[in-house]
Image (cartoon, rainbow, N blue to C red):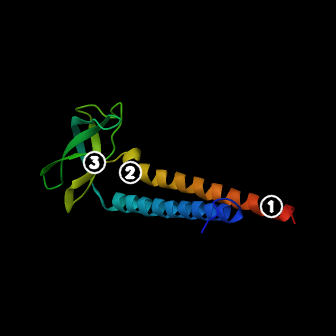
Amino acid sequence: MKTRTSGPKAYRRAVITMTLSGAALLIAALVTGGHTVAGLTSSERAEGTVVALELDRGAEPVTYPVIEFAAADGTRHTFRDSVGSQPPAYDKGEQVEVLYDADSPGDAEINSFVSLWLLPLIFAGAGLLLVTLGTVMAVTARKRALGSE
């Protein structure tokens, strides 16, 4: 049995897939953004110091800051931030504000725009792009169909 891979049905499938994928990414943006907002409201804050810069030699080398901070109870904790860059965004010895959960101080992050909002913004941007393209494709196809009648 032979299936057609082009034509109106394939175009319609592509529009639906693109639009639904975009909607899923927008939902992911809302979820990750909500998680960030919840974390901001419930996190403890501490002053931390960049004690090292770890180079990850993957396909493209990226440097991650390693931060040491003292929790409210005085215990010292060290963590590697989840966001790396090349060139490094921080210098060894630099002071940074740290956000952490009092119940799990090892799960900390630097209080910076990129650390907090990069993932929700990527999801939102990709989602908006796909929903917009899907909508434009659907409107164009609809106009074309009405024009040919």
**Circle 1/circle 2 CB separation < 8 Å:** no
Instruction: Using the image, determine if residue 146 lies above or below residue 88.
Output: below
For the point 77% across and 63% down, which residue is it? 142
Q: CA distance from mark 3 to mark 2?
A: 11 Å
Residue under pointer 2:
116
Q: Nearer the viewer, mark 1 or mark 2?
A: 1
In depth, the one of 144 and 117 nearer the eye is 144
For the point 64% across and 59% down, which residue is it? 134
Residue under pointer 1:
143
Mark 1 burial class by Cα count in 10 Å: few <14, some 14-19, many 20+? few
Please identify the quarter of the rendering in which residue 73 is found.
bottom left
For the point 34% across and 47% down, which residue is it? 111
Amino acid of disc 1: Lys
Q: Secondary structure at mark 1?
A: helix
Please provide percent x and percent y for residue 70.
Answer: 17, 48
Labelled disc at residue 11: none
* Quadrant (top left, top right, bottom left, bottom right) of the C terminus: bottom right
Q: Secondary structure at mark 3?
A: strand
Mark 1 vs mark 2: which is more N-terminal?
2
Residue under pointer 3:
98
Q: Secondary structure at mark 2?
A: helix
In depth, the one of 141 and 65 nearer the eye is 141
Mark 3 vs mark 2: which is more N-terminal?
3
Instruction: Tell whether 34 sits left or right of 133.
Output: left
